[in-house]
Amino acid sequence: ELKVEQNPLFLSMQEGKNYTIYCNYSTTSDRLYWYRQDPGKSLESLFVLLSNGAVKQEGRLMASLDTKARLSTLHITAAVHDLSATYFCAVDMKTSGSRLTFGEGTQLTVNP
Amino acid sequence: DTGVSQDPRHKITKRGQNVTFRCDPISEHNRLYWYRQTLGQGPEFLTYFQNEAQLEKSRLLSDRFSAERPKGSFSTLEIQRTEQGDSAMYLCASSLGLGLAGGNEQFFGPGTRLTVL
């Protein structure tokens, strides 16, 4: 059974600081997704990582994928309050219609 | 707006009643997924359709749950004899289903929040 673990689960940081969220998964998969969820809202797609070594950046967020280590990172640079949200990584199972298995989420709070 | 839409957005029902939710995917997407999310957790897969065919169901989907996608467009999720444990956000997502080589980015609807009293 595929398991996806994120850490930390809760992250409180000051504006202007940098931090990294980690996502580990238990079985082989080459496709990893990052989503953002604001309270009471649905999920917004942030990044799609399709191969080993993939790196994508959008604004203050950068995501990378190491399939050999079964690890993805979401790096936050110079955080701003607007980044406060819950971030989920998700992995799809090649043999299972690409349904997504999600991590527990990292609740990020950026304080002024 | 051509995103995924869901109806209703909120549903409050009494235990034992039946409820039905609707999802309209992005029009050119042939895959449609249902997930359930409880407070503080990530979404959990329930079932998915490729066009009108329901290809996989999670063990989470008890006999009280049924989903359809009659013409390969919109989908419905029905829960019979609701229980308090069914209270959750029910999310629908759709994708192009590009196959193993390509990504299968799923786009989520706003969700239906179900409260069972």
Image (cartoon, rainbow, N blue to C red):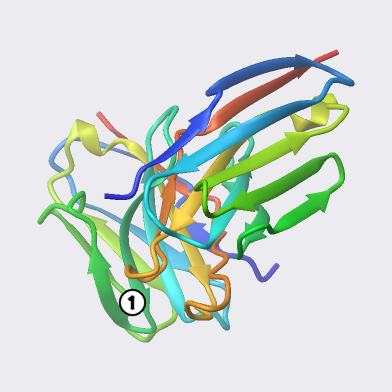
Residue A49 visible to an observer of this rendering: yes
Q: Is residue A92 above or below residue B82?
A: below
Residue B55 vs residue A54, the one in the foreground = A54
Q: Is residue B26 above or below residue A60?
A: below
Q: Residue at (32%, 68%) from the top-left corner?
A: A96
Q: Residue at (70%, 67%) from the top-left corner?
A: B1
Q: Is residue B113 above or below residue B48?
A: above
Residue B108 visible to an observer of this rendering: no
Residue B63 vs residue A105, the one in the foreground = A105
Q: Residue at (33%, 77%) from the top-left corner?
A: B69
| Chain ID, mark 1 | B
Determine which residue is flagged by label 1: B69
Give the SS element for disc 1. loop
Q: Measured from the top left, where is residue A75 in percent x and y?
A: 74, 36
Q: Residue at (52%, 53%) from the top-left corner?
A: A68
Badge 1 amino acid: Arg
Quadrant of the rendered structure where residue A89 is?
Answer: top right
Q: Is residue B92 left or right of residue A47?
A: left
Residue A11 vs residue B9, the one in the foreground = A11
Q: Measured from the top left, where is residue A42 in percent x and y?
A: 57, 46
Q: Is residue A87 left or right of residue A58?
A: left
For the C terminus of chain A, give its image quadrant.
Answer: top right
Residue farthest front in this picture: A68
The 10 Å Cα crowd at callout 1, few under 14, some 14 to 19, many 20 or more, is many
Q: Measured from the top left, where is residue A61 in percent x and y?
A: 78, 41
Q: Measured from the top left, where is residue A41 in percent x and y?
A: 59, 41
